[in-house]
Image (spheres, rainbow, N blue to C red):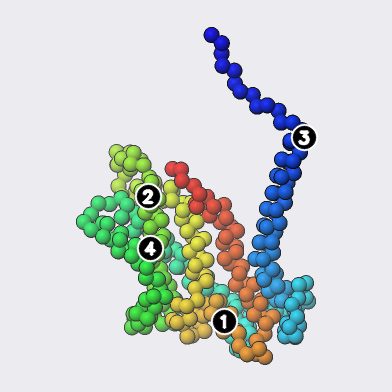
Amino acid sequence: MSQVQPAIAAPVPLAAEAPRRRRFLGADLTTHVILLLGVVLFALPIWIVLMGSTHDAATIGRGEVPLLPGSEGWNNYATAWSEGNTRRASVPVSTMMFNSAVMALLITVGKLAISITSAYAVAFFSFPGRMLCFWAIFITLMLPVEVRIFPTFQVVSDLGMVNTYQGLIIPLIASATATLLFRQFFLTIPDELVEAAKMDGAGPMRFFKDIVLPLSATNIAALFVILFVYGWNQYLWPLLVTTSTDVETIVIGIVKMLGAEADTEWNIVMATTVLALLPPVAVVILMQRWFVKGLTETEK
């Protein structure tokens, strides 16, 4: 009985290979041109702001759009850091960045802690009303801060938390989205792993500390990046709940620097904007590997 011979691809004639290679090169060139245009589209405004922060106020006041660095960069950044917009008596950038960092970090840590523990309870514990609790958390997705802002402000005001870090942070410290993501991840943990932990005598706290938390490390890292940027960029709630410059955040500070054309020091505003970009960019760069891994990894 004759054996079946594996099929061998027929060699492509050189005359047919050349047009196919040209098509691939053409597709690659088109892809790179589109990517290059996208990079220019997103990077050009940032480049203009970066270059504008190194020129004096008169250059920008004349309507010029500098594309090359000037000689006033150090003075502009030093003035913004220590004094802010001197014409409008604004808060120094160092104070505003400290307030934004405290707010963003505590919102991030609080959201992660509340979300992972509530998701752990909903996913692994059996108690009356468990699904009711889950759906109650889920429904809050339809009630963001913007929708419930006036009753929330009334509660914060009655508790005396206006112009405090507590007032900035506590109303934003719970996240239904993070709870939902953690719950869906916990549901993918194999039952065999849960039973093995029980047979080893692991209680709920030990199972949470030794099994659930290590498995959730990449998810926590990915959510940390997202929630930090979310907390750093908050505008509406800090604008409403703060009137004191002692707790003013960097986003609010940049808006307050803008006034009449003659009173706006655009070089200082641009320097402040560049400084405000640095912490979120640093978090994304430092945690890029964990961020991508947390969004794509599914194996346990």
Which residue bears the numbered disc 3?
15
- The front one of 8 and 151 is 8
Crowd class of label 4 (few under 14; some 14 to 19; many from 20; radius 10 Å): many
Q: Is residue 96 left or right of residue 155?
A: right
Q: Is residue 274 above or below residue 2?
A: below
Residue type marked 2: Phe
Tags 3 and 2 touching, CB below 8 Å:
no
> Residue 170: horizontal and vertical position, in percent?
39, 72
Q: Is residue 291 left or right of residue 214?
A: right
Residue type marked 4: Ala
The Cα–Cα distance between marks 1 and 2, rounded to whole angstroms, is 42 Å
> Residue 37: horizontal and vertical position, in percent?
69, 61
The Cα–Cα distance between marks 2 and 4, rounded to whole angstroms, is 15 Å
> Residue 208: horizontal and vertical position, in percent?
36, 50
SS for tag 3? helix
SS for tag 1? helix
Q: Is residue 264 above or below residue 48?
A: below
Q: Is residue 202 above or below residue 93?
A: above
Quadrant assignment, res 109: bottom left
Tags 3 and 1 touching, CB below 8 Å:
no
Labels 3 and 1: the sequence-earlier one: 3
Q: Is residue 81 above or below residue 296?
A: below
Which residue bears the numbered disc 1?
255
Residue type marked 3: Ala
Q: Is residue 26 left or right of residue 143?
A: right
Which residue bears the numbered disc 4?
176
Crowd class of label 3 (few under 14; some 14 to 19; many from 20; radius 10 Å): few
